[in-house]
Image (cartoon, rainbow, N blue to C red):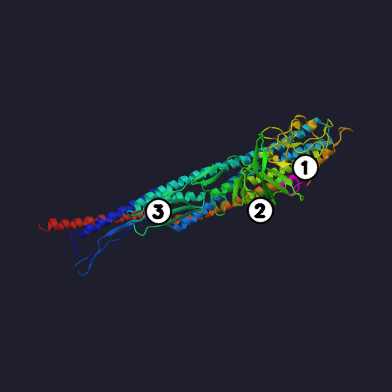
Amino acid sequence: MGSTFFGLNIGRTGLYAFQAALDTTAHNIANAEADGYSRQILGMRADRALRVNSTYGMAGTGVSVTGVTQMRDEYYDIKFRNNNTIFGEYSNKMHYMTEIENYFNEISVEGFTTSYNSMNDNLHELTKNPSSSAVRTQVVNYATTLTEYFHSVSQNLSATQESCNFEVGNMVDKINSFAQQIASLTKQIDSLEVRGGTANDLRDERNRLLDELSEIANTTVTERRAENMSDITSFVVKIDGQTLVDGMNYNTLKAVPREQKVNQNDVDGLYDIFWQNGQSFNTNSATLRGTLKALFEVRDGNNAENLKGTVASAENTEVTMSDGTSKKVTHVKITGTNINAVEKLNIPDQGTLTIHNKTYNYTGFKIEKDGSGDFVYTFELEEVMDPAALEGKSISLGKSISYKGIPYYMSKMNELVRTYAKAFNQIHRTGKDLDNESGMDFFTAVDKVSGKDYAFGTSGSNEDFDEITSRTGSFYQVPAEGKPFYGSYYLLTAENFAVNSSIIKDPDKLVAASDVTNGVENNDIAEELLALKDKRIFIQGTTEGFFQSLIAEIGTDTDKSVRFSKAQENIKKSIENQRLSICGVDIDEEAMSLIRYQNAYSLSAKVISVMDEIYNKLINEMGA
């Protein structure tokens, strides 16, 4: 049979076990609202029985604690993180698309429609009273208001692009911080678990960081537990398939400002992301998701309308630069492009070309037309190359991003103002002002450097200036003294769209008639300018029709992002609830466990109390 004091030891094991169970339950209750905490349970089993010399053969020795187990299901972790990534992408798109939509709000805010209609209403008044200086002033004032509307929207879109860019930098810093913290926690976990047991609370903290990381970019976690406790567990975290954390080691990213623009209207210093070792992080990856994907698509999205073509020829040429020095450069001629209208041209004056998967900086360009009217581009490369290595290769400028982001909407606004200004100017230049002088461009663009107005055509003609250049590199042109500052409509954007400063100063220069020698009440040009409102100058129809089409497009894109975001949020909540059903703390359940363990502890104490009475009777009273 067992020892005389055997029962006392059994009671002791019960006290220790249920004390641990009470502590675990208290820990669960204390962390019931803690973010990322997983419910813990104490594992207990009957202790190893003893063989005794009696008829019943084996005697129980009490209870032993097997460990504290974390209630967590890896399946729901993976499912939650995958959906959290998609939610991060759509929620950010919804935020920025709603912001963009507000800039074009035509219902509660007086925008394009109000300004455009007001200008045309006053043009109508001009047809009735073409000699009135007051009416002319009103036309000029409302036209200026129209240009200021485009300035405002352009500035707001640029501010949103800067905001996206700032967020990109923030996301890079967050990823680096998460990587450092995850690697540090992995080191602590390994050092504790290699001695036996499980570092439950540290694992909870690491999983919480992984959940947050998964919203920024698609995250995969691979953990291979050691077969014996003397080995370190393998733990690898990847974002978009690229290793971020490997055990106790981690990689970091850096946001590097671009030296060259990708689109004509881009703000300066947009970030590209690189790994610390200099390798590029592919932000245009087909598999990248999450907040990062949303930020880059909103910031850089061009609806895949970037310039593409083929290198027809290349040659090394000696050119004279703007400072008078000569330099040998490589000129690359590109044909078969997808952009053959100056109104749709939104490439930067200096930038980066990709020729057969290699990037080259260019310092300027010019555009000519071939016999069929298609554009032939000539780019001036920054460094001298072997022409034979370039000829026949495919070429592109910027990345093809199949999302309608800020560059896309900016290009649409540029197309609108260029097309409308061109049509208006061609009519305006053919008439005479009140002083019987040939009409000039009514709408123009202001050069940032000189502050001068561009001239897009010769007075008295409806022919536009047809030389399209970047005005950089060897294509730089010094304006002739006393001559108009000629340029192509490529130089006009929503940002610098303006009414001719000469007409603002003197509204009598506004043209209303083709000839005023027979009287200042002639109004044929004013009639033509007014008729432009209903003229189909876009594929979408009239100017107002083009703008309404753009508004509808923005509304559709915003509505789609809102619907996707809300649907994904519901899915995320559903998965989170499923996960919480396993790892979450139920206060009612823990309260019941607290009572059960309290009773069990009391009964174990009662066992010891009873055994104490037995031993007292046995030792102190039997010999009396």
Quadrant of the image containing the N terminus = bottom left
Query: Mark 1 highlights which residue?
Result: 423
Label 3 CA crowd tier, 10 Å (few <14, some 14–19, many 20+): many
Q: Which mark is residue 346?
A: none
The amino acid pointed to by label 1 is: Ala
Q: Is residue 392 visible?
A: yes
Label 3 sits on a secondary structure element that is loop
Label 1 CA crowd tier, 10 Å (few <14, some 14–19, many 20+): some
Label 2 CA crowd tier, 10 Å (few <14, some 14–19, many 20+): some
Magenta-drawn stretch contains 619: no
Expressed as whole percent of the image width and height from the top left, the position of residue 493 reads 69, 40
* Towards the viewer: 315 or 440: 315
Label 2 sits on a secondary structure element that is loop
Label 2 or label 1, whichever lies nearer to me, is 2
Range covered by the magenta-colored residues: 536-546
Q: Is residue 335 left or right of residue 516?
A: left
* Towards the viewer: 197 or 33: 197
N-terminal-most mark, 1 or 3 = 3
Q: Which mark is residue 39?
A: 3
Expressed as whole percent of the image width and height from the top left, the position of residue 551 reads 68, 46
* Towards the viewer: 241 or 362: 362
**Callout 2–callout 1 Cβ contact below 8 Å:** no
Label 1 sits on a secondary structure element that is helix
Q: Is residue 578 visible?
A: no
Query: Mark 2 highlights which residue?
Result: 392
Q: Disc 2 versus disc 1: distance between alpha carbons?
A: 37 Å
Expressed as whole percent of the image width and height from the top left, the position of residue 256 reads 54, 42
Q: Which residue is found at the position 24% from the left and 55% from the top? A: 12
Label 2 or label 3, whichever lies nearer to me, is 2
* Vertical order, 128 against 10 (above or below): above
N-terminal-most mark, 2 or 3 = 3
